[in-house]
Image (cartoon, rainbow, N blue to C red):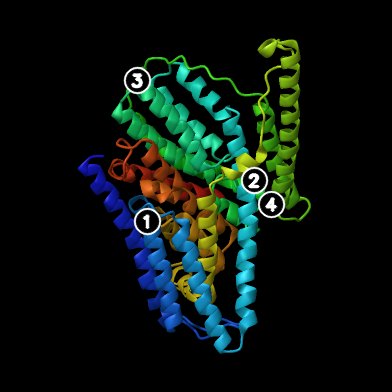
């Protein structure tokens, strides 16, 4: 790692912390806009030392999250601790006023929201891990690498596939897959790696913005019932514009030469194709449970997990039968039953991103605590009532490029500002694609800085931020034109 790259990464961390610190400073300042109590059995702690201590705990925790790559402290640890500290302070204060049940009911509501999100993501991650173990993603990478496409064609193919796959899988997995293709064929072509990585990050984030399955923020909006499943597709064209505008400009800087073709044939393991279809069926069930039965989509996802477990049972029986018959006949791989591989669904669950899942717990519970104190109501008044929903929602996207879009979107959902449907779609769009403005603004960008280390850096992405911003502005304009102001 060069000194220049170290400076770029340090600058990125400082910028992220500055955004978090800015929120911590502004929130208490908005106390002047308060109008007394917030209704119900709630204490206004926004000007109380408990409120200031809660903001301080959250700011310190988020600073440690930003410095994860330096300290090697997993990001889930500080936010979980902050969540406990914040609610402990709230609970103690409410006990002093003989109002324990109000705080208890509020925190139970936050935990219920997290439980639905947790189980939904756990099933999705299990399926992604199962498809990865069966070689589905390796096969796709191998197919692209072996075709001998030109650099410019690969630039468009990887970007397009990132845009199309992320709505079904997720933007992080999709970006990692496409980056593997870029690194495999680049042969050290720095310019192609940098521009291809930026293109993949923008494409994956844009594709994830018009599907409940593409990003955590869209999933939260869908599960909250604010935007129905079919209504997300109103964002397809704005999302496409968000990716295409910077992609078209960057493509002029990509060489038309072709890298040497690589003969790297990979076959999907037995059961891989069926697992892909089971995953698609699981998505259909999640949508159907929500749209047609009025039930939480997580029930459909858990039913899909049961299908994967039964299919894994079938694969294990088939593998045991193969081993027994192959031993008796000595026919080995030529045996007509094929060459199945044992499948353990619980090993796929164990390989889920547990640090990420626990990080979501800390974010949901901690931000919920700040909302219960009253800060989010003040922030909503300061942003949405004074600036107007359009300006506020555009700023949400910019803020999500500095501070992770998950706490930002959860804060907006907790505020629940009075907005029409077009504005809820707008904030869904901006929170999803705003992270593309900086490499540190999305999980996809952060992951690719590690995967393409030394090539795709904070500084390399920052040079193209004005071009990405053109796509950001254009996508907002297209949305307002098509879906209302």
Q: Up-down: is 455 above or below 397?
A: above
Residue 389, image x, y percentages: 49, 64
Check contact, mark 2 vs mark 4: CB within 8 A: yes
**Crowd band around label 3 with a 10 angstrom C-alpha radius: few (<14), some (14–19), many (20+):** some
Relative to the observer, which residue lies in front, 321 or 55? 321
Q: Is residue 439 visible?
A: yes
Counting residues from the N terminus, which is met first, the one under dot 4 or under dot 1?
Answer: 1
The residue sitting at 62% across, 40% down in the picture is: 347
Relative to the observer, which residue lies in front, 413 or 7? 7
Q: Distance of mark 1 from mark 2, alpha carbons?
A: 27 Å
Q: Disc 1 marks which residue?
A: 66
Check contact, mark 2 vs mark 3: CB within 8 A: no
Q: Up-down: is 331 above or below 35?
A: above
Relative to the observer, which residue lies in front, 326 or 195? 326
- Name the front one of labels 1 and 3: 1
Q: Distance of mark 2 from mark 3, alpha carbons?
A: 41 Å
Q: Is residue 273 left or right of residue 480?
A: right
Counting residues from the N terminus, which is met first, the one under dot 1 or under dot 3?
Answer: 1
Marks counted in the figure total 4
Q: Is residue 95 left or right of residue 303?
A: left
Kindly state the secondary structure of the residue where label 3 is placed: loop
The residue sitting at 22% across, 40% down in the picture is: 2
Q: Which mark is residue 298?
A: 4
Counting residues from the N terminus, which is met first, the one under dot 2 or under dot 4?
Answer: 2
Kindly state the secondary structure of the residue where label 2 is placed: helix
Q: Distance of mark 1 from mark 3, alpha carbons?
A: 38 Å
Q: Disc 2 marks which residue?
A: 123
Q: Which mark is residue 256?
A: 3
Q: Distance of mark 4 from mark 1, alpha carbons?
A: 30 Å
């Amino acid at each position: 790692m060069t000194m220049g790259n170290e400076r770029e990464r340090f600058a990125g961390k400082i910028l992220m912390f500055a955004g978090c610190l800015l929120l911590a400073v502004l929130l208490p300042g908005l106390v002047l806009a308060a109008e007394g109590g917030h209704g119900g059995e709630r204490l206004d702690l926004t000007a109380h030392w408990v409120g200031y201590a809660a903001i301080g705990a959250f700011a310190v925790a988020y600073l440690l999250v930003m410095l994860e790559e330096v300290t090697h402290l997993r990001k889930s640890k500080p936010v979980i601790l902050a969540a406990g500290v914040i609610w402990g302070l709230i609970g103690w204060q409410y006990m002093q006023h003989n109002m324990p049940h109000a705080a208890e009911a509020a925190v139970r509501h936050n935990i219920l929201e997290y439980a639905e999100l947790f189980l939904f993501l756990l099933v999705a991650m299990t399926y992604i891990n199962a498809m990865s173990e069966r070689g589905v993603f390796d096969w796709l990478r191998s197919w692209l690498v072996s075709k001998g496409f030109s650099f410019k064609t690969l630039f468009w193919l990887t970007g397009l596939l990132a845009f199309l796959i992320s709505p079904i899988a997720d933007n992080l997995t999709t970006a990692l897959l496409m980056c593997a293709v870029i690194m495999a064929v680049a042969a050290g072509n720095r310019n192609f790696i940098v521009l291809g990585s930026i293109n993949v990050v923008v494409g994956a984030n844009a594709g994830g913005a018009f599907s409940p399955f593409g990003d955590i923020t869209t999933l939260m909006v869908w599960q909250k019932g604010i935007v129905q499943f079919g209504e997300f597709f109103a964002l397809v064209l704005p999302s496409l514009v968000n990716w295409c505008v910077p992609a078209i400009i960057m493509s002029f800087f990509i060489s038309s030469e072709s890298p040497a073709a690589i003969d790297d044939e990979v076959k999907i393991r037995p059961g891989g194709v069926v697992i892909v279809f089971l995953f698609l069926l699981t998505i259909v069930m999640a949508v159907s449970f929500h749209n047609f039965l009025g039930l939480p989509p997580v029930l459909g996802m858990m039913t899909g997990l049961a299908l994967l477990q039964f299919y894994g049972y079938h694969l294990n029986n088939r593998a045991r039968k193969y081993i027994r018959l192959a031993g008796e006949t000595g026919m080995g791989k030529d045996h007509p039953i094929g060459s199945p591989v044992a499948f353990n669904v619980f090993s796929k669950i164990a390989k889920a991103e547990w640090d990420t899942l626990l990080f979501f717990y800390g974010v949901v519970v901690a931000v919920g605590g700040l909302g219960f104190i009253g800060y989010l109501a003040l922030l909503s008044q300061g942003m949405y009532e004074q600036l107007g929903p359009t300006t506020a929602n555009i700023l949400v996207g910019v803020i999500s490029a500095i501070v992770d879009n998950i706490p930002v979107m959860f804060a907006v959902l907790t505020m629940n500002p009075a907005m029409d449907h077009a504005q809820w779609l707008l904030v869904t769009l901006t929170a999803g694609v705003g992270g593309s403005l900086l490499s540190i603004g999305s999980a996809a960008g952060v992951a690719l800085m590690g995967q393409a280390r030394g090539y795709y850096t904070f500084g390399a992405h920052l040079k193209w931020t004005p071009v990405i911003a053109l796509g950001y502005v254009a996508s907002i304009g297209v949305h307002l034109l098509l879906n209302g102001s």
